[in-house]
Image (tube, rainbow, N blue to C red):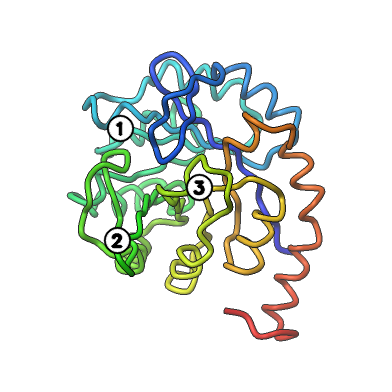
Amino acid sequence: MLKVRVIPTLLYKSVGLVKGVGFNSWRRVDTVLPAIKVYNMREVDELILLDIEATNENRDPDYDEIRDFSRECFVPFCVGGGIHNIEQIRQLLRAGADKVAINTAAYSNISLITEGADLFGSQCIVASIDCRKIGTEYHCFSHNGTVDTGYQVEQWAKKVVDAGAGEILLTSIELDGTMEGYDIELIKKVTASVSVPVIASGGAGNYEHMREAIVDAGASAVAAASIYHFTEQTPKEAKEYLPNIAMNKLNLSNGHCHGK
């Protein structure tokens, strides 16, 4: 059976976790260690921690903090924010990260993904792609959603996978924090373009939204934040809602129905 992963996203800013709408991330919601401990108890499949200030502040990740966080994290731990060279990837993995998410740096240096995959394995390299719809096209944005790179999402997704990325974290900037549902059209465009797992992010407000991202759009995993911070819904309940989806996806791939 294919496994459907439920992944909380932790947005880290200064000394705490934040959340907002459309990447404004204005509202402080928690601190990191207590959140990690709670998610451990709620049987999440992975955790993603993104330092949303590191790139714009042109500073390294805080390796000591990542080491402290990883000691309390008992599931695969993906860390992103401020990564622009191989030594930073090495230090994060040594500090306990299982994967690193690379976004802004890849647009100016795609070889960072290739070198990272060659040295540490493609399973450690997650290409983070933040998108906004411009007219009829989805454009990829860097620098925490503030700079239009000019790349269309299908073009960039293929490029990072060809470079060696083992997974894509795909986020809708417009739907981020709205809890109105994932951008199914966006997810379909990427899952139809690449063969690696795609983590859908941005917009989850209920478990049915997660089902749609997986079954209707082909995502391999669903990342979310606001749904866990601002409602009574939990990752454990999400996993209980979704168990048959994995078998349905397996049936689709075996030819019982026509897939994407």
Amino acid beneath label 1: Gly
Secondary structure of residue under mark 2: strand
Q: Position of residue 237 (x, y in %)?
A: 79, 42
Amino acid beneath label 2: Ile
- Give the CA separation, mark 2 to mark 1: 26 Å
Quarter containing the C terminus: bottom right
Which residue does the image show at 36% across and 54% down from the upper left? 131
Amino acid beneath label 3: Gly
Looking at the rendered structure, which numbered label has been put on residue 253?
A: none
Secondary structure of residue under mark 1: loop
Q: Nearer the viewer, mark 2 or mark 3?
A: 2
Which residue does the image show at 67% across and 78% down from the upper left? 253
Q: Is residue 7 left or right of residue 239?
A: left
For marks 2 and 3, the one nearer the N-term is 2
For marks 1 and 3, the one nearer the N-term is 1
Residue receiving disc 3: 202
Secondary structure of residue under mark 3: loop
Q: Position of residue 234 (x, y in %)?
A: 73, 36
- Give the CA separation, mark 1 to mark 3: 21 Å
Which residue does the image show at 58% across and 67% down from the upper left? 218
Q: Is residue 180 left or right of residue 141?
A: right
Looking at the rendered structure, which numbered label has been put on residue 82?
A: 1
Residue receiving disc 2: 134
> How many residues crowd around disc 1 within 10 Å: few (fewer than 14), some, or many (20 or more)?
many
